Amino acid sequence: MNKTNIQAVLFDLDDTLWAIEPVLHLAESQLYDWLRQHAPGVVQRETIESLRARRMLLAKSDPKYKINLWALRHTALIAVLTEHGEDPALADPAMEIFTTGRNAVTPFDDVVPGLLQLKPRVRLGTVSNGFADLGRIGLAEHFEISIAAHQFGTAKPDPTIFHAACTALDVAPEQTVYVGDDLTLDVLGAQQAGLRAVWMNRFKRELPDHVRPDAVCTDLTELASWLAT
């Protein structure tokens, strides 16, 4: 494959630049502890698991919640606070507790060195369905553009969110590589939008027969090497 015309690399965030599951579990625990103090009526009747089940049920009720995960959590909190006799206005400070925890991520060791290696060679951006705040996390300076689904209005694998990132960087889709861990949202989504796709396989998962990434990497060092060859 000819890689000489690649001018930009776009990244997914969760499980591509950092591990997200332990972060979410901790953030949900911090939120639950906050609710114990400020909304005891919720904690007396709900567990972390039941709150998660409520969100999953709510997510199926309206397609917008697949795009706006912040709104999903916020709406679910308003509903549960109201149901259990607590002030629904507590949803706002509760979401700030969760958001702070959700952004307390630790990038994989290869991320900053890898981005510094790539930056002189290609334009860098991010496209994410989550609501991580790269400014809070400390990575914003490495990217020219960052597009989040909840702000943009569509989510991966919709081609328009990939194309918007390409337009923002002034590159064509065929000149752009998208790097992500999700085979459907990231790899197939990017390829169907006309980009090349690199599967970031940090967790030794098996590649199914029906997906053909342009490359498979386990970290940004491998990605930089692949782009250079």
Image (tube, rainbow, N blue to C red):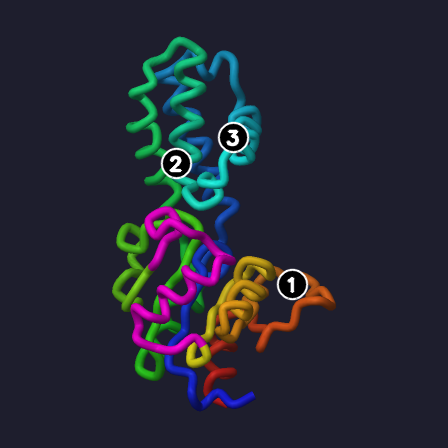
In the image, residue 92 sits, relative to residue 105, either above or below, namely above
Which residue extends farthest top?
85
Where, quadrant-wise, is the N terminus in this rendering?
Answer: bottom right
Name the disc covering residue 58, or none.
Answer: 3
When asked about the image quadrant of residue 114, the answer is bottom left
Task: Please name whichever residue, 112 or 80, is drawn nearer the observer in this view of the structure.
Answer: 80
In the image, residue 191 sits, relative to residue 155, either above or below, namely below
* Residue occupying image coordinates x 40% and y 67%: 163
Q: Secondary structure at mark 3?
A: helix
Task: Report the residue marked by disc 1.
Answer: 204
User: How many C-alpha atoms fall within 10 Å of the one at disc 3: few (<14), some, or many (≥20)?
Assistant: some
Q: Is residue 151 magenta?
A: yes
| Total labels drawn | 3
Q: Amino acid at mark 1?
A: Lys
Task: Report the residue marked by disc 2.
Answer: 71
Q: Secondary structure at mark 2?
A: helix
Q: Amino acid at mark 3?
A: Leu
Residue 45 in percent (x, y) is at 52, 13
